[in-house]
Amino acid sequence: MATVTLTLNGDVRTASVPPETTLLRLLREEFGLTGSKLGCDVGDCGACTVIVDGKSVNSCLMLAVQADGRDVVTIEGLATMSRLHPLQQLFEDKGSLQCGFCGPGVIMSAKALLDENPDPSEQEIRDALAGNLCRCTGYSKMIEAIQAVARDGRGEPAKSAV
Amino acid sequence: MDRHDTEDKKSAVVERKTPGDALGEMLRAPAAAPLVPTPLETLVPEARQQTPAVRQRATRPDARLHGLGQTKYIDDMYFPGMLYAKIKRAGIASARVLRVDTSEAEKMPGVIAVVTGRDVPCNSFGPSLKDQPVLAGERVFHAGDGVAAVAAVTEQIAAEALEKITVEYEPLTPVLDPLVSLGLETPGVHAPSPNIYGHKVIKKGDVEKGFAASHRIFEASYRTQMVEHVPLEPHCSIAMWDANGRVTIYTTLGRITLGRADLARTLAVPMSRIRIIATVVGGNFGGKNEITTEPVVALLAKKTGRPVKCTYTRPEEFISSTTRHPIVMDYKTGVTKEGRILARTIRLVLEGGAYCSWSETTLAKACILSPGPYDIENIHAEAFVVYTNKTMTGAMRGFGAPQVCFAYESHMDDIAKALDIDPLEIRLRNALREGSLSPTGQQLQSVVVRDTLLQAAQRFGWSGDGAAS
Amino acid sequence: MKRRGRGIACMWYPIGFTVSANPSAAVVKVNEDGTATLLTGTVETGQGSLTILAQIVAEELGIATDDVHVVSADTDTTPMDTGAIASRTTYVTGNAARLAAEKAKKILFEVAAPLLGVKPEHLEVGDHKIRIKGFPQRSLHIGDVAERARGVNGDPPIGSASFNPATAALDAETGQGKPFATYVYATQIAEVEVDDETGEVEVLRIAASHDCGTPINPMLVEGQVEGGISMGVGFALEEEILFDATGRQINPNLTNYIMPTSLDMPKVEVDIVDSYDPTGPFGAKGVGEPTCVPTAAAILNAIHDAVGVRVTSLPATAEKVYAALKAKRAQEGKRLGAGA
């Protein structure tokens, strides 16, 4: 068993897991954070995307032990008790998600983009989402929502990322 | 029910099986799920509160949960004592099953039960033809067939147990091409049943007369490929029985009424003792319209007395779910000098793969729609669907329509070019109108194909300046 | 060199099963405060069908979408439904839901009529009220009527109904008959750029004009069209399950089975044409499947327009387009040679 200590959505958390455990399984099975999804388990679909030290990563490809000592933000870390993250609000308003299974991963990729580049071009948005497969939406309304968040200057880092 | 609610009970159950080992350690690890924030004061988008309600751009109540990561898909559900199932795939397209030896798998620590086709009370189902087994019986009909299933305390152990199952096959020559399958001398995939398991004809008017009156006659052939639905969420189900012999099944199935009938049949259990709850489905597109893992988990749950969950791996999504029918399409069209279609004959050969599934309705829709949205007096369309030893085809968004549309619209452009008519113009000249008779002689209403042509042309900025730009 | 081309394709598509009965049933319960619950056996598989059904029930009862809660997808608690298939939910389940709401509304009208001093047939709903046709100021709040229906009249406003599309069997010899109750129509126009040195195709733009009868929720209709087009782009250019000589799949994974990403999707412009089907709920038909029907045809016609090659088998991969270009050049070369 390996001990992993990480900052998860702003809180320091520790778990003891078999060394082959992925970050995705650590989040879902040890911490009960089921927002990150398992769609392929080999890094092709992006449904498991989380942000580690400011970069979006496929959590199914990262071992839990590799997250030791690092800062991890998941979809559960975006909203506060009283307010949706602007991406969550705009994704809702614009009907950006359909079945929603890819949604948390897409929103995390978008957040990583906006944290680094608050005013991305459409092409930069498309580039940032290239690792997140969606079968329902054709990506159009996701891109619209991300553009709207950027336009409103609301792509500021969520406070939970501290 | 969430994993963190039930961790203690789960550990207690597992302990009996694997005391003190690494696995037990892992499963006894303390639960540490934090509260998921629930926004209380957020804007409620106005469209949802308006009357009249119709034509409003109302947001979806599930959209908020999706965006928060709070939607409970089936993979996010856990029940106390739950086991994980995996299915052994044949990996051979056509074979006789001589022997399935599960004894080594059963001996593995952490493996609780194994089932094979012999354990299925009624090992056949299907929406029209009942030609699909739950798990292979004496024959394998395509490489994605399941031959045995294991329930174990972890997915990892279940997967390892599959490797310990040995199956002895007598390989048979597979039929892999729909046109070969069509041949009379080709051995039947499901002998003694013929390979052609569906046939449809639409006859309207007199095509010979139409061709005779035509200025020119065009012929072309088209072919489409097999594609997969690729829902982002894999197929999954969880079954559990109560002490009264009632089974509850959570599933990603898009059609629970039919699903319950299929389960009643395959499990030989009255419908009143089956409850199916479809969870929020992470993408369907026609691919989640019949049972897959449901009877398997039900049998394993019955055998073990514990809830059992089975989730397809991504490769299983490809090899063991349904796919889109590849179609070979031959068109012959007679037209006037002005591009009016006078007669059209069509022959379609649909590849059904190993089982019928939703082929019957795909065959009918493809055949009926194959002349296109055009007012044609003389039509002869004929369609066949044949078995092959490949992945089964089934319901998929459009039921044969994207295939035939590719054919009739490619054909239309070639005719337009040859007659030097603008592609938009030739379509407007032939399009169905209010009250037109369809290929099956049905008088059509609310027909707006011309409106869509003109509106799309306006949006695109299509100028009718000849075929090529 | 990169060459641009445009291609058009139109289509028609039916709602519901071919001839076979495919009914849906529904139950609508109006609560004592005028909100409502719909019970349906259909399953939300991503399209937003439960939202559409809530809008239909709300419209029939004169309340808002937010006032309707939908309970679905449980064989123990919800009535039968043929399911999320064949683009049938808005039309078939929608009709069942509307009829169930109408029956509940009828109970409310019976209760409200004597209070307003008119016959039930002179009443209508709107803006959370039951009111006299032509005299909207004479009205009662639907919640007050629902509470009275339960507490005074002892007749709780609950309605149940089923609906099955009207079809007629096809003649076995000629296939003549009425296989479907209604059809939708659409046109898509694609603009592509083809690299004539590599055969690579980029879809730049798609204009999509779709009929769905009355769009119950235009935003969700747009979502269906955009998503269907992405499936059509994959069908046209990328996706194919490949088999080895023994019949086993070669590419059963998302690494080697290529489906559209955000980089492959063109700009999509959606128009919803005016249309009304009197047999649909508030004139609605459906939209799910047809959105992916004309896309591949439009793209392949655009490729032909751009570089003059007709690819007759899908998908039109770069390899296939390149091979067709090479064959075309060889033939043109031969023709030139013969001419000289």
Image (cartoon, rainbow, N blue to C red):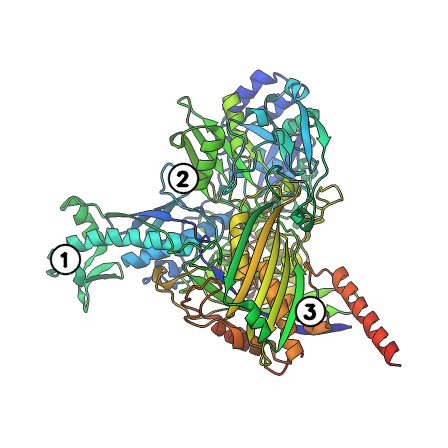
Question: Residue C322: x and y, percent?
Answer: 78, 64
Q: Amino acid at mark 2?
A: Asp
Query: What is the spatial separation of the Cα atoms under label 2 and label 3, in whole angstroms?
Result: 47 Å
Give the crowd class for mark 1: few <14, some 14-19, many >=20 residues within 10 Å: some
Question: Residue C170: x and y, percent?
Answer: 45, 55
Classify C113 as above or below A43: below
Subunit bearing disc 2? C
Left or right relative to B455: residue C144? left
Subunit bearing disc 1? C
Give the number of the disc on residue C113: 1
Give the crowd class for mark 3: few <14, some 14-19, many >=20 residues within 10 Å: many
Left or right relative to C8: residue B121? left
Q: Nearer the viewer, residue A120 or C40?
A: C40
Q: Amino acid at mark 1?
A: Ala
Classify B99 as above or below B343: above
Q: Is residue B124 visible?
A: yes
Q: Nearer the viewer, mark 2 or mark 3?
A: 3
Q: Which residue is mark 3?
A: C303
Q: Which element type, helix, strand or loop, lies under badge 1?
A: helix
State the quadrant of the N terminus of chain A.
Answer: top right
Q: Amino acid at mark 3?
A: Ile
